[in-house]
Amino acid sequence: MTTFRALLAILAALLIAACTDTQSVSQKDVNALAQQLRALGPDVDPAEAQRAAEISYTYGRQLAREYNVTSSPIVHNAKVLNGFRERGLCVHYAQDMQKRLNQENFRTLVVHRAIADPDSIWRIDHSTAILSRRGDDMFDGIVLDAWRYGGDLFWAPTREDTRYNWRPQREVLEKKAAEKLARQPS
């Protein structure tokens, strides 16, 4: 009986630990992103790069709390789509991250929006924010994807993010609108 109680206590502790946000944003991670942003070009302001990195990490976590994310991103999507949560789709993370970063009025960095079309029937559209040096396009920037790991920021140079084939948001939306129009009976 004592062994059973001990196992129950361990199980309860594991369940409680699994439901708490024990990971904190590490300065090492923030600094690595800031360094990558500075490496976009010699005219990137180091202070802007540092501020953008800090915001990207902390705001992704803040959004997960605001969206009440308690499960994997795909399960959370189902909760949103079925009315159990109001927000938390990738498009919400991308919109909110873009809005927050744009509040900084960066002089040397610019926020882009991108969408990855599904490459199979098993995948869905995915949206993200991308930060680049002012004057560069999104393909020369850094993907800032807070949805992918439920609020824990994923980042990578756009061309190195092999999980998704990113395209400019406007291009994808225009293509979808044209396809929808073509499906309508004449």
Image (spheres, grey):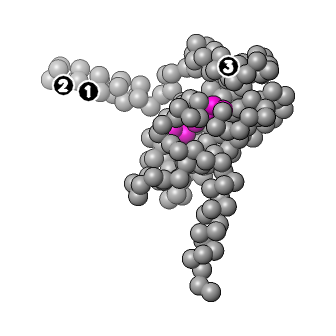
Residue 127 seen in the figure: no
Earlier-in-chain disc, 3 versus 1: 1
Q: Identity of the amino acid at label 3?
A: Ala
| Element class at badge 2 | helix
Q: Residues within 10 Å of mark 2 (few under 14, many from 20)?
A: few
Q: Which residue is mark 1?
A: 8
- The Cα–Cα distance between marks 3 and 1, rounded to whole angstroms, is 51 Å
Does residue 110 sit above or below 38 in this rendering?
A: below
Asked if disc 3 and disc 1 are in contact, CB closer than 8 Å, the reply is no
* Residue for point 63% across, 74% down: 181
In which quarter of the view is residue 98 placed?
top right
Query: In which quadrant is the C terminus drawn?
Result: bottom right
Residue range corresponding to the magenta coloring: 141-148
- Tell me the residue that label 3 is attached to: 39
Instruction: Provide the secondary structure element on which disc 1 rests.
Output: helix
Per the image, the residue denoted by label 2 is 4
136 vs 125: above or below = above
The location of residue 152, given as percent across then percent down, is: 54, 30
Name the image quarter holding residue 178: bottom right
Q: Residue 67 colored magenta?
A: no
